Amino acid sequence: MYEIAPVAGGKEGGMARVATLKKQIKQTNPNTFLVVAGDFVSPSVYNSLQYQGQRIRG
């Protein structure tokens, strides 16, 4: 499973990190073409399932 929301108290994952990485790459080479392959914006329902307040890792 992949996680689009921040995890580990915001130290891992999250779209803000993706946006920062994209900005850094584009500054290095403005002609860079970035692609997100797969269903990144609409992940599996399993990604958000929780049991007793903890995310289920599948």
Image: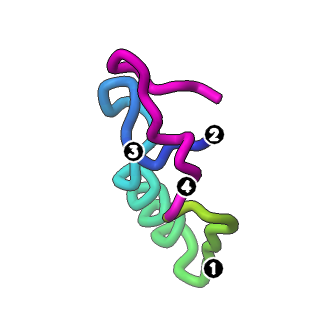
Q: Amino acid at mark 1?
A: Phe
Mark 1 vs mark 4: in front: 4
For marks 2 and 1, the one nearer the N-term is 2
Mark 4 vs mark 3: in front: 4
Position of residue 46 relative to residue 9, above or below, is: below
For marks 3 and 1, the one nearer the N-term is 3
Category of crowding for the residue at label 2, using alpha-carbon neighbours closer than 10 angstroms: few (below 14), some (14–19), many (at least 20):
few
For marks 4 and 2, the one nearer the N-term is 2
* Marks 3 and 2, how far apart at CA: 12 Å
Identify the mark at residue 21; answer none if there is no mark.
Answer: none
Identify the mark at residue 43; answer none if there is no mark.
Answer: 4
| Residue bearing the label numbered 3 | 5
| Residue bearing the label numbered 2 | 1
Residue, far top: 52
Category of crowding for the residue at label 1, using alpha-carbon neighbours closer than 10 angstroms: few (below 14), some (14–19), many (at least 20):
few
Residues in magenta, as a range: 42-58
Contact between marks 4 and 2 (CB within 8 A): the answer is yes
* Marks 4 and 3, how far apart at CA: 11 Å
